[in-house]
Every structure is written in C-alpha cells, then in structure tokens.
Amino acid sequence: MSLFRSLLAAAVAAGLFASPALADRPRDQDRAFQAFRQGRSMPLPMIERRVMPHMGGADYLGPEFNGQTYRLKFMRDGRVIWVDVDAATGRILGRSGD
C-alpha cells in the first residue's frame, strides 16, 4: 500500500505543478479577443465574411491568430490553402497553396 500511496501522491503533485504552466499560455481566441477589445483587430466573423467570397467554394477549416494577422485555412480538391489577412483592416495580404 505504501508504494501505491507514494505513486498517487507523485501523480497528484505532478498535476498540480503542470497545471499553472498550461493555464498561462494564451490561446489564439484569447489573443484575438484582447486585440479586438484594444481596437487592434476586427472581429473574426467580419474577417471571415470578407474572405469567403474570394475562396470559390473551398471548405473553411478554421483560423489562426498571431496578434497582427489572421491565417485562415481552407481546403479545395485535397489541397490546403492559407489566406493571410491583416487583422486591423481585413485586407487580404496573401494566399498560399493555390
């Protein structure tokens, strides 16, 4: 029983020490929300509405946000297409994978 308790205590302690590190890492959506609140970014739905008409029916897979640009991921005919968009203006900066 002593070995079991020691292993259990070690597992609990490892979980307690690992959790704060994971909690401190901001997620894309948190960074995007903060940028929007600070006036540095347009809301994602508005960005998506601007880009979608240019994608000719490609399937939209989702966004990434790096603080200044959104990178929207699409798929058409088995190929991935990335569209980089200025977060502040909604202007398309470039496409790759076409």
Image (cartoon, rainbow, N blue to C red):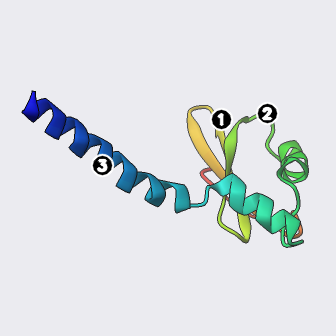
Q: Which residue is the site of mark 1?
A: 76
Q: Which-is-in-front pick, marks 1 and 3?
A: 3
Q: Residues within 10 Å of mark 2 (few under 14, many from 20)?
A: few
Q: Is residue 9 left or right of residue 1?
A: right
Say the numbered circle drawn on residue 13. Answer: 3
- What residue type is disc 1 on? Arg
Measure the C-alpha gap from mark 2 to mark 1.
8 Å
N-terminal of the two: label 2 or label 3? 3
- What residue type is disc 2 on? Gly
Measure the C-alpha gap from mark 1 to mark 3.
47 Å
Q: Which-is-in-front pick, marks 2 and 3?
A: 3
Q: Which residue is the site of mark 2?
A: 57
Query: Toward the viewer: 69 or 16?
Result: 16
Query: Toward the viewer: 38 or 4?
Result: 4
In the image, what residue occupies the spot 84% across and 47% down? 48
x, y percentage for residue 55? 79, 43
In the rendered image, the quadrant that contains the N terminus is: top left
